[in-house]
């Protein structure tokens, strides 16, 4: 790897994790198109305005935040909830055998298969490492992580 490639690798990893796209791994990396597409997605995922209860358009960040808090605050408020009616409406779908299977301890082979089935360049875990680290260092850290 050239010196420039070595210097650009951390930036490439940052953008790869931010974008979370499989096609990046296929060769398109750190290009103008890639950065433009990432910026476009950010704009697409941004809520720039909402309509209030009176039908007026609110486009200030504070106004959008207040409408959102008000809407979800009322929707997920726990007052006046008949929990018995909700619990009574839920039909169990798991029988005893299924429950035994789902609650049994998993094996080292199952754990390793799940880890190696993950895409290696997806988001990092809470410890800051993505699946690539664990896949490449399995012989060193695999049993400790499993335990």
Image (tube, rainbow, N blue to C red):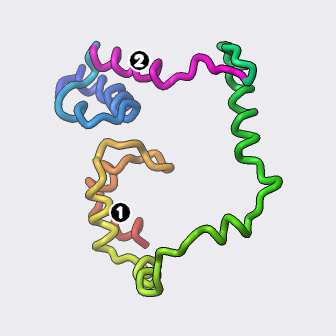
Which one is closest to the eye, mark 1 or mark 2?
A: 2
Which quarter of the rendering shows the N terminus?
top left
Which quarter of the rendering shows the C terminus?
bottom left
Question: Between 47 and 137, which is closer to the camera in this rendering?
Answer: 47
**Residue at 26%, 37% in the rendered image:** 22
The image's mark for residue 39 is: 2
Q: Which residues are magenta?
A: 33-52
Q: Based on the displayed image, in which of its 4 quarters is residue 140 positioned?
A: bottom left
Q: Based on the displayed image, in which of its 4 quarters is residue 113 positioned?
A: bottom left
Magenta span main SS: helix
Disc 1 and disc 2 in contact, CB within 8 angstroms: no
Give the mark, 1 or 2, whose residue is nearer the N terminus: 2
Crowding at mark 2 (Cα within 10 Å: few <14, some 14-19, many 20+):
few
Image location (x, y in percent) of residue 4? 24, 20
The image's mark for residue 101 is: none
Where 135 sits versus 128, above or below? below
Image location (x, y in percent) of residue 17? 38, 35
Mark 1 secondary-structure assignment: helix
Q: Which residue is mark 1?
A: 141
**Residue at 43%, 77% in the rendered image:** 102
Question: Between 96 and 35, which is closer to the camera in this rendering?
Answer: 96
**Residue at 68%, 30% in the rendered image:** 68
Q: Based on the displayed image, in which of its 4 quarters is residue 71 positioned?
A: top right
């Amino acid at each position: 790897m050239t010196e420039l490639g070595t210097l650009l690798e951390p930036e490439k990893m940052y953008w790869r994790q931010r974008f979370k796209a499989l096609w990046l791994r296929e060769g398109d990396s750190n290009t103008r198109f890639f950065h433009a597409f990432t910026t476009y997605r950010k704009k697409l995922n941004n809520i720039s305005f909402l309509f209030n209860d009176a039908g007026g358009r609110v486009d200030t960040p504070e106004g959008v935040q207040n409408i959102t808090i008000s809407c979800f605050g009322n929707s997920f408020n726990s007052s006046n909830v008949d929990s018995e009616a909700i619990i009574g409406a839920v039909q169990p779908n798991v029988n005893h055998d299924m429950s035994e299977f789902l609650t049994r301890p998993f094996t080292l082979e199952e754990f390793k298969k799940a880890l190696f089935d993950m895409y290696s360049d997806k988001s990092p875990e809470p410890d800051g490492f993505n699946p690539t680290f664990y896949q490449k260092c399995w012989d060193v850290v695999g049993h400790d992580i499993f335990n």
